[in-house]
Image: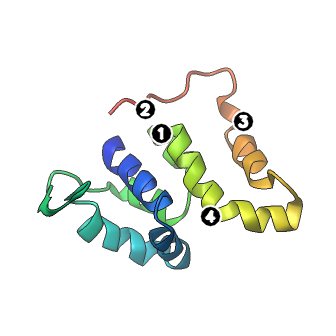
Amino acid sequence: MSKYYVNKFLFTVDRDTHLLARYIESPRSFVSAWEQSIGPKLLGNDVEASSAHAFTDEERRALVDHDFVSLFEMGAHFFLNLTIFIGIYDEPYAQKYGPLAFQREFAQKLRHWRGKDYPSIAT
C-alpha cells in the first residue's frame, strides 16, 4: 500500500469542500480523476508533478466504496480516515440517528481491533 498516497488523498479531499462534494457525488470517477490530475501534483506546486505514486486496486476499491475499515486495516492514518468520513456521513447519520451516530458506527465496525496493536501508519 502506498500509505503516503492514500493519506494524501484523505488529507487533500477532506480539506477542500469542492473536492469533498465531488467525491461524495461520484466516488468512482472522482478517485480516478484525483489519481490522474490532482494526486501527482506536489502540494502547493502546480508546475511539478510526481509519477512515483499510484493506488493499488485494493486502495482504489476502498476509496471508491468509502470502505473506511479496509483503509484503516491497510494502514491509512486513523485521524485522516475518520475525519473525511465524518465530513461525508456525520450530518445524514445525525439527522436519522442522532448526534455522533456515524462516529459510533465507525467505532463499532473497528471493534474487532480492540486490544490489538493498530496497523502501522508509518510511510
- Distance from disc 3 to disc 2, alpha carbons, whole Å, reads 18 Å
Please give the name of the residue rendered at 72% of the width and 41% of the height, measured from the top-left corner: 107
Category of crowding for the residue at label 2, using alpha-carbon neighbours closer than 10 angstroms: few (below 14), some (14–19), many (at least 20): some
Q: Which mark is residue 88?
A: 4
- Distance from disc 3 to disc 1, alpha carbons, whole Å, reads 17 Å
Please give the name of the residue rendered at 86% of the width and 67% of the height, measured from the top-left corner: 96
* Sequence-wise first label, 3 or 4: 4
The quarter of the image holding the C terminus is top left
Mark 1, residue position = 77
Report which quarter residue 122 is drawn in. top left
Category of crowding for the residue at label 3, using alpha-carbon neighbours closer than 10 angstroms: few (below 14), some (14–19), many (at least 20): few
102 sits left or right of 32 in the view? right
Looking at the rendered structure, the secondary structure element under dot 2 is: loop
* Sequence-wise first label, 3 or 2: 3
Looking at the rendered structure, the secondary structure element under dot 3 is: helix
- In front: label 3 or label 1: 1
Mark 2 touches mark 1? (CB < 8 Å): yes
Residue type (three-letter) at the residue carrying disc 4: Ile
Mark 3, residue position = 111
- Distance from disc 1 to disc 4, alpha carbons, whole Å, reads 17 Å
- Distance from disc 3 to disc 4, alpha carbons, whole Å, reads 21 Å
* Sequence-wise first label, 1 or 4: 1
* Sequence-wise first label, 3 or 1: 1
Looking at the rendered structure, the secondary structure element under dot 1 is: loop
- Residue 45 makes an appearance in the image: yes
